[in-house]
Structure formats: structure tokens, C-alpha cells
Image (tube, helix red, strand yellow):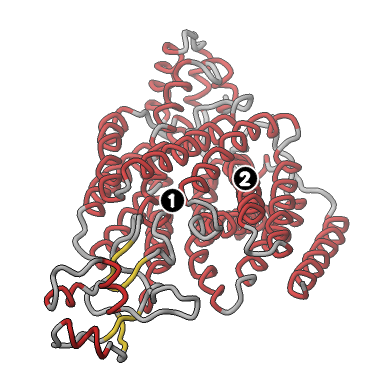
Amino acid sequence: MADFGEILRNIGEFGLFQKITLFALCFPNVILPFQFASVFFIQSDPERHCNTDWILQADSNLTTDDQLNLTLPRQEDGTFSRCQMFVPVDWDIGDIREFGLNETTGCQNGWVYYNTLYEFDLVCDQANLLEVAQTMLMAGILVGCLLFGPFAESFGRKRAAQIPVIVMLIFTVTTGLSPNFYLYLASQFIMGIGYGATEWIGVSKRSWGSCVTQVFGAVGQCVLAGVIYFIRDWRLAQLITAAPLAVVAVYIWFIPESARWLLSKGRTEEAKQLITKVAAINKRTVPESLLDKIVEKETEKKGGIIILLQSSLLRKYFFTIILAWFSLNVTYYCLSFNVGNFGLDIFLTQLMFGLTELPAHILCIWLLEALGRKVSLMSTLLIGGFLCMLILAVPQGNAVAVTTLATSGRFFMNWAGSICNVYVQELFPTSFRQTASGLGSIASRAGGLLSPLLNMLAVYHWSIPTIVFSSLSLISGALSFLLPETRRKELPDSTDELTVSPDDTFIKALILQSVLVSEVCCITACVN
């Protein structure tokens, strides 16, 4: 019998076929950041004042300054109130000037904004609805993982890639055309469901599959900042996004199925045909003896989640990697959703986020091969968590320092995310690999779902979110020592081929020490 690694060595591990397929699967990642345009660029407290055009009925020739002085109360610092106005009266302009207005109320006719992308009036007593919008998008992404993870296992990787693209195309347009906030929420949720590597890449180039995908996403982050800066209209940005999505929706139907998945399902004839085509594209010849071995290969009995429950080694690997994935996503999205709150220009901060992602993912390709998966994951989580913890030691008025630390922390979380994407594919056997990836994605999306809610705890004290996500990153980084090294090793096809983890006694001592260090850091931060 021939394992899939032997097949790839004969037909080409990273030939023309793999490169074309990788580009086709990576290109949508340039577009995906635009799905966050409306929730990233809604500022939490934009410059504004109540709409008081009612007074123009008394005197249509009032200047803007006169209108504001007569209709808006002032705050303690002398600026006009953002959430209050004087109660409208049916007086002539002379009486209003002579006696003035004293009784205040909330804004009755909406707001007037200054140089902002704002919409839906999510301000004042409705400010928390901004986090609701962010949560709905992340909830949709979580539901998409729940649906398409098992779907990919049962119906193949090809269908699991095609359907989400169609869903995103339809609801990207719907989001841009939403006439009210509630339809916008529904569209964001369903679009999130569609927000979704191929197994054709061999052991020598496997890290490229994940990291290059993330590089495309980083390019999309940079493009997003530029597009929104020049367009200044998130609705138009949503509609512009639909155009390249339509191109993807056409060519995605020509992406081939995973031969590894076909073999795992016992569909050997289809797998043979695909392998022959791939060899021809890569200008290789498949030996007949190898094809005969493919036919003879037996598929392992499927157990899905049962395999995880039966193997203590799998359970240890699984819960360690999903904690890391969960923690890094909590940190990543807590920082991302605060893009407008660090004190610097929102477009500059978003551009910095995108630019720092590029070297993170490019370096990741080298680091994974030079240092391996285990050391890479541990170091990125620990360093990233430490940098985020340092935010607590910086005065919140120092926008440059806060933004620098937040961008650096996000840099390492991005790095760790790329490593997790590779690692989860290499830790588990073929019969459980897609299930593990799906469950890991669910855990990571759960982290993204909780991040807007965690950010809301800042109303009690600004440091609470930072303490929580920094501590999670530090603890998960220490726990990553439980994982084995998988660099340059063939993907396991059965539980018998799993790599044994290091000595548990030493691991427990390290974990205990790391947890204690994390607790000391949290206590010190709170005292400061």
C-alpha cells in the first residue's frame, strides 16, 4: 500500500498544480477583510451633535454657530453636548434669543456627524449596539464553522469551499443595501456563516499552504484601509467587494477535490484519476505499480469525535491546540475591534495592522521550517501575551505607545494563528483531521465571538479586557509545551502513527510555573 506522502513525492509536492490551486484558494483572503469594513470603521464615540434644524422654522437665516449656541447645552469643558439638546419650543426667534432655552432632552431628530463613516446612529444610549453588530458577525462565523466543518468531512472539501462563497456574495450585497440596523444585523450574521488549504501540498512545503493564505489576508487588510480612506462609504465598499467575490464564485467550481479525502472515503478510482491529472500538470509520470498500491489501500474506520474520546493522547493534543487557538483569537479580535479607540487616526492604525501582518506571515514560513511548530507556537503566544500585558503599564493618553504595543501584540497573535493552522493539520490522523480542524475553528471563532463582549467590560475598568486576553495568551503559550514537534513528518493516517508527547512530569512543573507567573503579572498590573 502507498501512503499519500509517497504519492506526492512521485507526482510533485509543490508543482504547478499546487501553486495554481494555492493561489486560487488564497485569493479570496484578499477580499475577506472587507467583510469587516462596517464593524471595524464604526467609531465608538464620533464627533457629533444633535440635529436641531427645528429652530430654522423660526429663522431660516441663522448661521450654524447661532443655531448651535441657541439649541445645544454645553458640557463642563465648554464643548457642545453630544447626546443632549434643548427641548424644541414654538416661539419666535426673538423670544428664544431673549429668554433662552433651559429644559434639555435626548436627541429627538438624530445626529449631525463630522467627517465620519458613521451610520445607524449607534451612539449615546445605543452605543452598546456597536458591540452587538460585531458579535452578530462573529456569531455567524461560529455557526459557519459548526455547519461546514462536519459538512467538509462528509461531502468533501470542494463543496465546503463553494457554498460559503455563494452565501458571502449574496449577503455582501444585502449588507450594503440594508435600509435599517436590524436587516443589517441579519445580513451580517448570514454573511458571517459564509466566511470561511488544501491537502495537495507535500511535507516539505506544507507550511506554505497556511502562511501564504494569511499573507493574502494581510494584503487585504492594507487594501481595506486604503479603499475605505478614499471611498469613505462602507456601503459602497461592500458592493465593490461583491465584484471580485463574483469572480471567485465562478472559478471555485473548477477547484478539484482533495485526493487525500477521496482515499479516506474509499473512492480510489476517483482519486487515481485526480492523481494522474495532477502528475500530468506537474509534468511527472505516475508509476503503474504506485497506482496499483493506491487501489489496494484500505481506509481506516471512521469514528469522528469518538476517536478523540478514545485516545488520551489525542485529547491532550486537541485541548491544548484549541486553547491556544481560542486565546489568540480573543486577543486578536479584542485589539482589532478597538482599532478606532487607540488614539491615532483609524485609517493609519488599520494600515499598520495590515502592514505588520505581512512580515508576520512571511517570517512564519521560515520560522516553521527553521525552528519547528512547537517552539514557534510557544514563543509567539508568550511574547504576544507579554506585549499586551505591557499596555497596562502605559498611560492611556499616550496614543503612540498604546498603538505600538497593541500592533506588536496583534503581530504575534497573527503569527501564532498561522502556526495553529499548520499545526492542527499535522497533529491528527486523516480520519479525524478535518473534524479536529473544524472543532479548532469553532474554538477560535468562539474566541472572536466573545471578544466584543469582553471589550464591553471596559465600562467597569479599562484594564479588564487587557488582563483577561493577555493572561489567556500567556497560559496557552505555556501549555503548548504539551504538543509534539511535527516538522518535516508525514501526516498521520491513523492513530497508530501519532507522535508521542514529551515527559508529563516536566510538563506539569512547567505549566504550574507558567500559571503562577501569569497570576503574578495580572496582580502587578492591577496594582499599577
Q: Tell me: residue 348, above or below residue 287.
A: below
Q: Mark 2 belongs to which amino acid?
A: Phe
Nearest the eye: 467 or 317: 467
Q: Quick one: quadrant of the C terminus?
A: bottom right
Q: How far from the left and from the top, in percent, is residue 30?
A: 41, 36
- Any part of residue 204 in sight: yes
**Label 1 secondary element:** helix
Q: For the residue marked with disc 1, what is the amino acid?
A: Gly
Q: Is residue 82 left or right of residue 511?
A: left
Residue 368: image tag: none
Quarter of the view holding residue 17 = top left
> What residue sits 27% from the left and 63% below the top?
186
The residue under the point 44% across, 65% down is 44
User: Gap between marks 2 and 1, in whole Å?
Assistant: 27 Å
Task: Report whether residue 312 is seen.
Answer: no
Question: Which of marks 1 and 2 precedes in the sequence?
Answer: 1
In the image, which is nearer the foreground, mark 2 or mark 1?
2
Up the image or down, 91 lies above or below 526; here it is below
| Residue at image coords 40%, 79% | 74
User: What residue is shown with label 1?
Assistant: 149
At mark 2, the secondary structure is helix
* Cβ atoms at labels 2 and 1 below 8 Å apart: no
Residue of label 2? 411
Q: Badge 2 local density, few (<14 within 10 Å), some, or many (20+)?
A: many
Q: Position of residue 147 (x, y in %)?
A: 38, 55
Quarter holding the N terminus?
top right
Circle 1: is it few (<14), some (14-19), or many (20+) Cα within 10 Å? many
* Residue 405, position as x, y percentages in the image: 66, 52
